[in-house]
């Protein structure tokens, strides 16, 4: 019978503890909950404002860089265009300068030749027609002759080859053109070789007049 007897200690059931643990939020109280909830939106707003300020600064910096790059590119484009124009102008000047001696030879021939006979005159007219055609082409390219005789000597336009005394022209005035000068669209294509006046010579200067109050020589005694 002892084997069927139950142990009173085993029949007893262990009841779970009736001690309840309150949540931390409950222990903190309603005031702490409301303060935490109120603090989060303020911090979030401040963070967003800082991010916005940072983005504004980055935008201003990028815009400034863009404007600077755009200005540099525009200056580069203008400089390239100006350099191309200068190079084109130099090539035109170089080509036309090689043609000018041909024009000089035409002009010398026109001044020196005096054809006689109908055949020679016909050849001379053809020769002069070719010369006029060449001059017309130069005009179309913007080439113009300099008018230098009677002008004041200017080293930016003239090249003085000779200087001589002159009673007709004052000093530093061009009295004769030895080789014609040319402009190209307002730019000097070739300087004119000229003869420049030195003015009257020292021996031609007028003698100084005697002063009015100079003493008269004494009369000889009789």
Image (cartoon, rainbow, N blue to C red):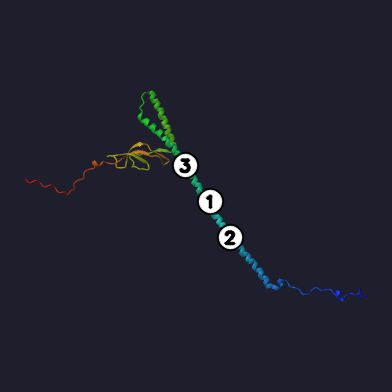
Q: Is residue 26 left or right of residue 205?
A: right
Measure how far apart labels 1 and 2 are at the Cα level.
24 Å
* Mark identifier at residue 115: none
Q: Is residue 69 left or right of residue 222?
A: right
Single out the residue that lies furthest toward the front: 2
Can you see residue 9?
yes
Q: Is residue 25 left or right of residue 203?
A: right
Residue 58: percent from left, percent from top:
57, 57
* For the residues bearing labels 1 and 3, Cβ distance under 8 angstroms: no
Q: Secondary structure at mark 2?
A: helix
Query: Which numbered disc, 1 or 3, marks the residue that appears first in the sequence?
Result: 1
Kindly indicate the quadrant of the structure image that contains residue 92.
top left
Residue 85: percent from left, percent from top:
47, 42
Measure how far apart labels 2 and 3 are at the Cα level.
49 Å
* Mark identifier at residue 54: 2
Measure how far apart labels 1 and 3 are at the Cα level.
26 Å
Single out the residue that lies furthest toward the bottom: 8
Q: Secondary structure at mark 1?
A: helix
Name the residue tied to disc 1.
70
Q: Nearer the viewer, residue 32 or 150?
A: 32
Name the residue tied to disc 3.
87
The crowd level at tag 1 (other Cα within 10 Å; few <14, some 14-19, many 20+) is: few
Residue 37, relative to residue 87: is it above or below? Answer: below
Residue 12: percent from left, percent from top:
85, 75
């Amino acid at each position: 019978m002892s084997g069927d007897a139950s142990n009173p200690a085993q029949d007893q059931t262990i009841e779970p503890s009736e001690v309840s643990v309150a949540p931390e939020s409950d222990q903190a109280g309603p005031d702490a909950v409301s303060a935490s909830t109120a603090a989060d939106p303020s911090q979030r707003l401040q963070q967003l404002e800082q991010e916005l300020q940072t983005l504004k600064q980055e935008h201003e910096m990028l815009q400034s860089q863009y404007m600077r790059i755009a200005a540099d590119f525009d200056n580069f484009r203008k400089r390239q265009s100006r350099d191309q124009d200068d190079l084109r102008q130099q090539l035109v000047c170089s080509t036309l300068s090689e043609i000018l001696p041909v024009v000089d030879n035409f002009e010398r021939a026109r001044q020196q030749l005096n054809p006689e006979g109908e055949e020679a005159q016909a050849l001379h007219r053809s020769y002069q027609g070719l010369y006029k055609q060449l001059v017309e082409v130069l005009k179309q390219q913007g080439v113009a002759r300099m008018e230098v005789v009677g002008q004041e000597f200017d080293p930016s336009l003239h090249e003085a080859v000779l200087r001589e005394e002159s009673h007709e022209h004052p000093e530093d005035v061009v009295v004769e053109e030895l080789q014609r000068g040319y402009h190209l669209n307002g730019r000097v294509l070739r300087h004119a070789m000229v003869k420049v006046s030195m003015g009257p010579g020292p021996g031609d200067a007028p003698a100084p007049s005697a002063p009015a109050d100079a003493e008269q020589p004494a009369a000889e005694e009789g």
